Image (cartoon, rainbow, N blue to C red):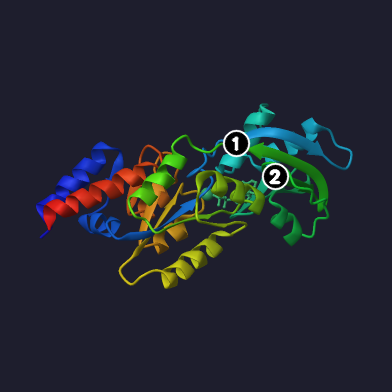
């Protein structure tokens, strides 16, 4: 039988908007040694603002934006939302004949009789699209039409108000190491990591690389220590499932992620991790 104290702990957590899916996870929260964060939508708001539109190959800014908006028409990635919002116009769903989301890289879509790619520099390289690799202060969405570079859209994300407090609070609770895993470029990942005081940053990762990083960390921790991963649930369900404790941000995340998670933070505030571990520690004192 489950000790009564666990129910108390689960109840206290739920009052704070934290859903803990069982007493065993409260116990595991007590033993967290390494906290691994996803970046986009977890430490940052994940609602991007378009800051720069740079067409290439003779098209206009508006044409580049329209092309990207159509490519992103069916994506639920926060990058897609921001590009559609920046375009602003009506998008005719029947015009996108074929569409594929390339997880952690971008989109391939058939629009206007052409194949459009929209995504990271890594996507452009893997599809052999030639482009100038100059860096930009933000996340860059490159666009190609039928294999020819059509330009880039730069978007800026903002760090969540409570993210720094979350990292500091975890350290104060004795968490040994904080790590950030991101599919975004190194320059953006490292800037966010530096701002927040995160110990270790790994960028330009595909979802399966994130799983590999969890496995690497597993080998580096002490035998009893647990690894906690917290993500927004957009394409990080495999990592959520692989970590000892998978935490999903419930507001932005997909149903699949909420299902795969052991703990759900309904308010999308990373500082709730500190609250959850604090409650787990107090629960332990009552139970044992
Ligand atoms: P994170 O790990 O920070 O949550 P993701 O794995 O969701 O980031 O995405 C990694 C990168 O892949 C993004 O920074 C972007 O360059 C590219 N990408 C992913 N999905 C899309 C999309 N729908 N449109 C354009 N680019 C995308
Ligand atoms: Mg993500």
Q: Residue furthest top?
A: 89
- Residue 177 placement, left or right of 285: right
Residue at the image position 89 percent from the left and 38 percent from the top: 58
Residue 199: x and y in percent read 50, 55
Residue 258: x and y in percent read 38, 49
Q: Is 212 drawn above or below residue 286 in the view shown? A: below
Q: Quadrant of the C terminus?
A: bottom left
Using the image as rendered, state which of residue 142 and residue 51 is in the foreground.
51
Q: Dot 2: what SS?
A: strand
- Residue 173 placement, left or right of 59: left
Using the image as rendered, state which of residue 250 and residue 33 is in the foreground.
33
- Residue that numbered label 2 is attached to: 140
Residue at the image position 70 percent from the left and 45 percent from the top: 141
Residue 57: x and y in percent read 88, 42
Using the image as rendered, state which of residue 18 and residue 151 is in the foreground.
18
**Mark 1 crowd level (few <14, some 14–19, many ≥20, 10 Å Cα):** many
- Residue that numbered label 1 is attached to: 48
């Amino acid at each position: 039988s489950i000790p009564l104290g666990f129910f108390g702990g689960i109840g206290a957590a739920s009052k704070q908007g934290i859903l803990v899916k069982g007493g065993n996870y409260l116990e595991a929260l007590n033993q967290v040694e390494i906290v691994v964060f996803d970046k986009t939508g977890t430490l940052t708001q994940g609602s991007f603002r378009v800051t720069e539109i740079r067409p290439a190959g003779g098209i206009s800014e508006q044409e580049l934006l329209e092309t990207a908006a159509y490519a992103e028409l069916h994506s639920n990635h926060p990058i897609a939302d921001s590009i559609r919002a920046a375009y602003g116009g009506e998008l005719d769903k029947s015009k996108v004949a074929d569409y594929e989301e390339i997880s952690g890289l971008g989109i391939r879509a058939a629009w206007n009789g052409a194949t459009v790619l929209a995504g990271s520099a890594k996507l452009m390289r893997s599809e052999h699209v030639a482009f100038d690799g100059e860096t930009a202060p933000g996340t860059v969405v490159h666009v190609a039409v039928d294999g020819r570079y059509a330009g880039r859209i730069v978007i800026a994300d903002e760090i969540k108000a409570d993210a720094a407090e979350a990292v500091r609070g975890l350290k104060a609770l004795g968490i040994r190491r904080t790590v950030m895993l991101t599919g975004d470029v190194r320059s953006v990942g490292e800037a966010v990591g530096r701002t927040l005081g995160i110990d270790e940053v790994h960028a330009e990762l595909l979802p399966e690389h994130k799983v590999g990083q969890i496995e690497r960390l597993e080998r580096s921790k002490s035998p009893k220590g647990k690894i906690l991963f917290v993500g927004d649930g957009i394409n990080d369900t495999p990592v959520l499932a692989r970590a000892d404790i998978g935490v999903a941000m419930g507001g932005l995340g997909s149903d699949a992620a909420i299902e795969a998670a052991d703990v759900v933070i309904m308010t999308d505030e990373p500082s709730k991790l500190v609250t959850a571990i604090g409650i787990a520690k107090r629960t332990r004192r009552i139970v044992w």
